[in-house]
Amino acid sequence: METLAGDRPTTRGDTVGGAADDSRVDFDEFVVARSTSLLRTAYLLTHDHALAEDLLQTALTKAWFAWPRIESNPEAYVRKILVNTFASWWRRKWNGEHSHGELPEPDPSHPRRDEHAGADQRHDLWEAMGRLPRKQRAVIVLRFVEDLSEAETARLLGIAPGTVKSQTSKALAKLRIDPALVEPTVTSTSPEDRS
């Protein structure tokens, strides 16, 4: 990490004709200016603050080493690194699910929270997004939070535009029926019903 704190590798534009390339954004300035936005994207992809910070740090490290090759629009390049790194993590990492033949008995010393209590207060989009498969979550984040087009999202994820459309459709269908987002139905009992 000492290398990162030291001198940045020189870019082609730094030495051409003895003048610095003014169109080139300095890496440190880029990180200061764009890391908050990139961290938000990383959080929306991972749905975990610590993983989002790890993901952003990994993407920025990769970008730092590639900085001399970045011709223009460094944010798009870093976002692509961010999404590709996230995609490689979801392909590689185990989800932590355990299958059991029988459900474990609840511990009486730790009362279980009623899953349906307070359903009217659980209209939490982020909770629902966390239950989406990672590829669908990535498509939703890029399309609706980052406001990218279908073509840009497809290019960034390395998939076909048709896949972006189908993943968007599937994700939106799941969000429409997610318990955290569905309004509870209120049944009223009129005096006639009680008799």
Image: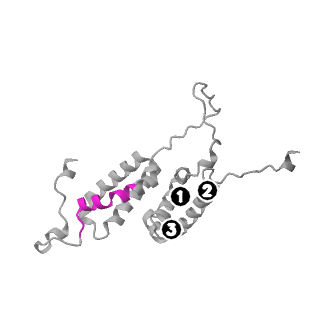
Q: How many marks?
A: 3
Q: Earlier in the sequence, mark 3 or mark 1?
A: 1
Mark 1: which amino acid? Gln
Residue 22, percent across and down?
A: 20, 72
| Overall secondary structure of the magenta section | helix
Return the residue at label 3. Answer: 160
Q: To which residue does mark 1 refer?
A: 136
Q: Nearer the viewer's eye, disc 3 or disc 1?
A: 1
What is the C-alpha distance between the residues marked 2 and 1?
A: 10 Å
Reading the image, the residue beneath label 2 is 174
**Coloration mode:** one colour
| 95 over 83 or under it: above or below | above
Instruction: Name the element at disc 1.
Output: helix
Q: Report the quarter where the C terminus lies.
A: top right
The answer to which quarter of the image holds residue 13 is: bottom left
User: Disc 2 vs disc 1: which is toward the camera?
Assistant: 2
Nearer the observer, 26 or 65 = 26
Q: Residues within 10 Å of mark 3 (few under 14, many from 20)?
A: few
The magenta segment is 24-39
- Give the CA distance from mark 3 to mark 2: 21 Å
What is the secondary structure assignment of the residue under circle 3? Answer: loop
Amino acid marked by disc 3: Ala
**Which three-letter amino acid code belongs to the residue tagged 2?**
Lys
Residue 3 position in % (x across, y down): 19, 51
